[in-house]
Amino acid sequence: MRRKDALRLHEEIMLLALRDREGTVVSGTMYNFAVGGAVLAELMMEKRIEVEAVRKKKFARVLSPAPLGDPLLDECLAKIAGAKRRGELRTWVGKFAQAKGLKHRVAQGLAGRGILRVDESKVLGIFTRKIYPEVDPGPERGIVERLRRAIFQDGGEVDPRTAVLLSLAKSADLLKLVFDRKELKGRKERIARVVNGELTGKATQEAIQAMQAAVMVAVIIPAAAAASS
């Protein structure tokens, strides 16, 4: 069961993606799509939406529009509930991933919890940008330790939230930021079992598979469009 003061999945993804001292996002990752996937995964795990499969397509079906008390989640839920036409999971992941100010909204929420600090830095000595250095490393250490146990310890079930987090982090290429690549390579089979939902319950397995597919497709489409332009 999730504690009331526990971080949401999209907040955990942001902590993994940000450089601790610099407060900037590490380049070469698709963290924003992982954040978009995390939002949908949270809504699924909180039983606000479910996956509705129609032929080979997977849509988001609203079970309850009741707010959760998280501004970003509630806004995204309202968008799904208020849409004139139902959207596929990959569509919503893409929309949420490219939402204006997404990084700043999540990071500022973490700053409000005292985990990050809102600061500014100069780019090329001209442009000013907001950065979010880490001031309380405890929460991120806890996240990394959960992932470490899931990846490097054999046997036993992996708790649902950690399994979904691992799936999202892997899809967005964030694992390399916190673990040695060679060590990860040696644990491919274990990671695959967690990501495929083999070590969790059926409901979590559905969430993992749906999010993994949605995130990967949402990432591929804009990348392919950019390559062809």
Image (cartoon, helix red, strand yellow):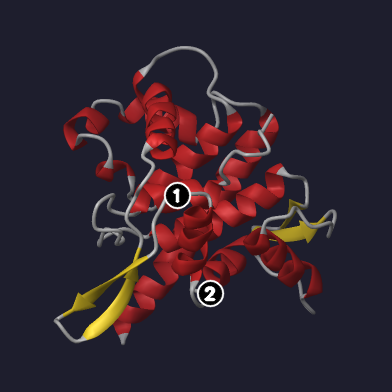
Disc 1 residue type (three-letter): Ile
Q: Position of residue 206 (x, y in %)?
A: 64, 40
Instruction: Tell me if mark 1 has few (under 14), some (14-19) or many (20+) residues whose alpha carbon lies within 10 angstroms of its own.
Output: many
User: In the displayed image of the protein, which residue is found farthest to the left?
Assistant: 124
Above or below — where is 186 with respect to 14? above
Instruction: Tell me which residue sits at (27%, 53%) in the image.
Output: 19
Above or below — where is 169 with respect to 22? above
Looking at the image, tell me whether mark 2 or mark 1 is earlier in sequence order.
1
Q: Position of residue 75 (x, y in %)?
A: 69, 67
Determine the CA span between mark 2 and mark 1: 16 Å
Disc 2 residue type (three-letter): Ala
**Residues at badges 2 and 1 in contact (C-beta under 8 Å)?**
no
Classify mark 1: helix, strand or loop: helix
Which numbered circle lies on residue 99?
2
Instruction: Tell me if mark 2 has few (under 14), some (14-19) or many (20+) residues whose alpha carbon lies within 10 angstroms of its own.
Output: few
Closer to the camera in the image, 110 or 208 = 110
Instruction: Tell me which residue sits at (39%, 63%) in the image.
Output: 118
> Mark 1 — residue?
13
> Seen in the image, is 125 located left or right of residue 128?
left
Residue 214 shows up from this direction:
no
